[in-house]
Every structure is written in structure tokens, then in C-alpha cells.
Amino acid sequence: MSIKIHLDNPGILTPGATISGTAICHFEHPEVIRGITCVFKGREYTHWDVQRSRNSVKFVGKNDFVSQERRFAHAGTLPARTYKYQFVFNLPDRQLPSSFDHDCAAIQYFIKAKVDRPIGFDYKDSVSLHVASPVDLNDFVDQISMRPLRNQLEEFPSCCFFTSEPLLLDFTINKDAFVVGETIFVKINVNNTSSLHVSEVKLSLIQRLNLKVENPDIREREENEVINQVRALGVEAHSEKEYFLQLKIPQDLLVPLFLNCRLIKQSWVVRAKFTFQSCQSDIICESIVKLGHIAIGTRDIVADLPLSGANISSSSIDWIPSDVFVEQEGTTELLGEVSSAPPSYNEVNGYLPKYETK
């Protein structure tokens, strides 16, 4: 007595794809049922533990942004035999979130078949699906200018209850949208009018996730993962310095699409961090950029999935890096090391987290 799902076309799916298969039910004796159904769902799931007094409380969020159902049989008694039910599901063709796994969140797709029994346990089977949804920057053309992105700050560093003169920052990125494989060019002008020495300038590309749970109550948290990073020597007190820095976007970087998601939001941040030698207060300057797989002005399909062969668009402004850059085996260093991203959940634990498919 069982039910099994067999897919005709297993493998990576893309928006607009068709999923077909067969649900096979085997009954060794007549079976009283309330129905036989098969559902296809796309689900976002968030969770983390919150310490309350002496207990740890699990907070979760769950939202099905895609749900399609096929009913194979209604209530009644089925004779003993093997039944085969064919099904077809069609994925939405636009703005479908990508499959995603994180230690606090996931986007998962699955097909689940069930024999609903009034007495005893239901017979169930489920299969997971992987959806790769390329990010097309043309879909965000109203939010993208492809012009330099400039941020000017006046910050007053403080140390031991003493507030110094300001640090004047002029932070410019060559454009506001990139595709995987491109290089982000950043120009930073630092006018340090303070009496404090800036010991280090650190430039990072960060994937920022804003997550929400809804049960037992609403909570939010932010997760930041460093994708790439370069470091440079700092600025002496009462002096001025100009930097030309580069951040390479990895060609194989997974850029998930979270449109239509309620619990998971994402942004890509270029952050400059200025560390002072004699105090613990750092100054941070950030700008948000967009990353994708298909460049503005093209509609070419990304051929190699999962998402690794994107089109590379040309920069919208010419930049001349200073001669302090050293190219080494495809990475760029500026008087310092290129730090790698922290290990993923899979690398640390040896497996990906599993989530319920109820």
C-alpha cells in the first residue's frame, strides 16, 4: 500500500517550464479513501530560535507563493490494484523566485501526492524540484540609471568621549547595476580633517537578506554575507587621499530572485569601512546596487544553469585604476589581501537544511 511520484522531466527548471509525471498508487486490498490529490507548491520558509528566559522558542514563517492542485479521485472505495494518475503543472513564466537554501531561510519547490484516508495514516510521497530563475536587469529598467552612483558623507569620529573633526567622504561607484562576472570600480576621496589616524579602508560586496517570521509573533532580522573584499592602507590625520578600488563579481555567483516573496528580501551592498587606529568606532559608507544575469539592452537567455554564463555588459564610464593595483591570478589586491567569503551552511555542516513540505 503506497503512492509514488515519477517525473517525466527531472532536472533544473526555469520559469514557464512544464512539469509532467505520474502518481502511482498500489493497494493490496480495497481501500476506503476521502480522495487522492497531487499538489505543486513554491514555498518561502524562514526560521530561527529566540531565547526567552530559560527556554529557546522557535520562530517560523511560511508562505506558499505558488500552489496548484490536481484531484485524481473523490471519496469512495477503490478495489485492490495499481492505479496510475498522470499530472501536468505549468510554472509561472515571469518573476518566479529561485530555489534557495540558507541556515535561516529557504525557497523550495515540491510536488506532493496524497491518499487521504479517513482511518489510519495517509499515504504520501513528495519530490523536491530545483528552479533557476535568471535575473533580467531589463525587468528593473525603471529602477536603474546605469550612471555613476555617488554618496557624500560628513562623519565625526569619536573616541573615549572625545569627538574629533569630521571625516569627509566622497564615495562613487561607476554605475548602479552589474551582471555576474563584471568588476565594480569604486572611487573614494577621503579628507581626514580629524586628529585620528585611519588605519585601514575595507571595501566589500555584501549580500544582505532581510528575513521575517510570523509565528508565534512577527520578528525580523538581517543577515549579511561578504562575497568579495579588498583592503587598502588608511589615511593619516589631517591629510587627504584618493582611492581607486575594484571588486570582482564572481562569474558563478548565485543571484537569487525574490520577487513576490513576503518573508525574504534581498539587496546587494557595496560597503566602505574606515577603521581608526586608536578607537573602536568605525565609519561605514554604503550604496545599494543591483546584480543580475542578463544585461540592460539584451534579452539573451542564460544557457548554462544554474546561472553561470551571464552576458557581460560594458561599463558606462571609463575608470583609470592607480598604479598601486597588483593583478594576481584573476584577483585584484591593493596593498593588502583579498578576503574570501565565509563558508556556506553546506560547507560547515556537510548538508543543506531540510524544511517541511506539509
Image (tube, rainbow, N blue to C red):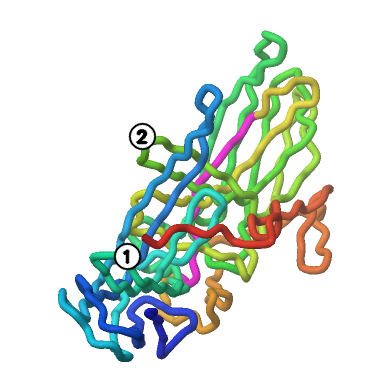
Total numbered badges shown on the rendered structure: 2
The range drawn in magenta is 283-295
Quarter of the figure that contains the C terminus: bottom left
Counting from the top left corner in percent of width and height, residue 187 is at: 64, 48
Counting from the top left corner in percent of width and height, residue 262 is at: 34, 50
What predominant SS class does the magenta segment belong to? strand
Q: Secondary structure at mark 2?
A: loop
Type of amino acid under label 2: Asp
Type of amino acid under label 1: Gly
Cα separation, mark 2 vs mark 1, equals 34 Å
Residue 292 drawn in magenta: yes
Q: Residue at x 59, y 38 (%)?
A: 170
Quarter of the figure that contains the N terminus: bottom left
Question: Does residue 147 appear to the left or right of 189 in the view shown?
Answer: left
Q: Is residue 246 visible?
A: no
Residue 236 vertical placement versus 299 (above, below): above
Q: Residue at x 79, y 21 (%)?
A: 278
Q: Residue at x 70, y 50 (%)?
A: 244
**In the drawing, what numbered circle is on residue 217?**
2
Counting from the top left corner in percent of width and height, residue 342 is at: 70, 51
Question: Does residue 119 appear to the left or right of 1 in the view shown?
Answer: left
Q: Disc 1 designates what residue? A: 120
Write down the quadrant of residue 162 in the picture. top right
Q: Secondary structure at mark 1?
A: loop
Q: Nearer the viewer, residue 253 or 315?
A: 253
